[in-house]
Amino acid sequence: MSMKPQVPARGSLLSEAASWINRYWYPLLALTRREIRKRYAKTLFGSLWTVLLPLAMLAIYLTVFGLILRAGQTQAQTWDFALSMLAGLLPFQAFADGLHRACLSLREDCSLLEREQFPGEVLAAARVLSASVAEVVGVMLLFIAASFHSGQVSWLILVLPVVILLRILFTVGLAWILSVLSVFVADITEVLAFVTTAWLFLTPIMYSPSALPDALAWTLAFNPLYHFVEMYRGVILHGHVDLALPFIVSAWALLSASIGAWFFRKSIERAKDFL
């Protein structure tokens, strides 16, 4: 007598999906909104700064590099340089800001960790998401400026949300690790400031990759932010990317998130004893 495999009831699957969303996505979005409101709570323009700051940054860089620091180059060349630098600075700033905010997330919200069913992973992830709001606005403004400058619009811009999500996923993985480590070692936040500054100058954002000395050129292959920056530039400015690049940034994002999630789950209970 053959046995038919049991298929979960549709209602059961919907119930499990709703439970998963309620456990992770609802607190994640709620905490992200809280972080955004908290950051701009005492300012005159409030959350409008998420638009004003990227707009001001875009205007300043285009003015300085497009009109003032031309250094014998044509205006088109200097604007190309300014747009290229912004395409690297926007994701890097969101990356660095997200990590700095996530470092203290467990200490700042230790009361939430006392709740048995609360998913502690969302604390660091919410900081990373809130730090990425200005980046999203900034890259949209950058794309508009680049389109006016070149007079062309590439269909590749449609994959930009996926690129941003991969960058966020990569950042969240590191944020999970740092949020736990900072509970045990308070100096992590100070060390992180030095590391991100060094990482900024080792990543070809304000200079061409070919300008990197031969002794350091090999580091590009192992620098995930270099690949992310090149992906942003290809999608926003050039309308094409190297065929291997999407696979490389996806691998970095998944590797970071996997290791970060594993480390967080292995260490969070021990970290709670120190909070």
Image: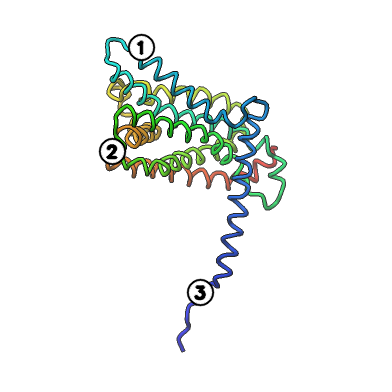
Question: What amino acid is found at the position of numbered circle 2 in the picture?
Answer: His
Q: Residues within 10 Å of mark 1 (few under 14, many from 20)?
A: few
Q: Is label 2 or label 3 in front?
A: 2
Question: What amino acid is found at the position of numbered circle 3 in the picture?
Answer: Val
Question: What amino acid is found at the position of numbered circle 1 in the picture?
Answer: Leu
Q: Earlier in the sequence, mark 3 or mark 1?
A: 3
Residue 181, position as x, y percentages in the image = 58, 35
Label 1 with label 2: CB-CB less than 8 Å = no
The structure's colour scheme is rainbow
Residue 187, position as x, y percentages in the image = 60, 26
- Badge 1 marks a residue whose secondary structure is loop
Distance from disc 3 to disc 1, alpha carbons, whole Å, reads 67 Å
Image disc number at residue 240: 2
Residue 128, position as x, y percentages in the image = 54, 37
Q: Which residue is mark 3?
A: 7
- Badge 3 marks a residue whose secondary structure is loop
- Badge 2 marks a residue whose secondary structure is loop
Residue found at x 55% / y 40%? 176
Q: Which residue is mark 1?
A: 69
Residue found at x 27% / y 14%? 73
Label 3 with label 1: CB-CB less than 8 Å = no
Q: Earlier in the sequence, mark 1 or mark 2?
A: 1
Residue found at x 69% / y 37%? 274
Q: How many marks?
A: 3
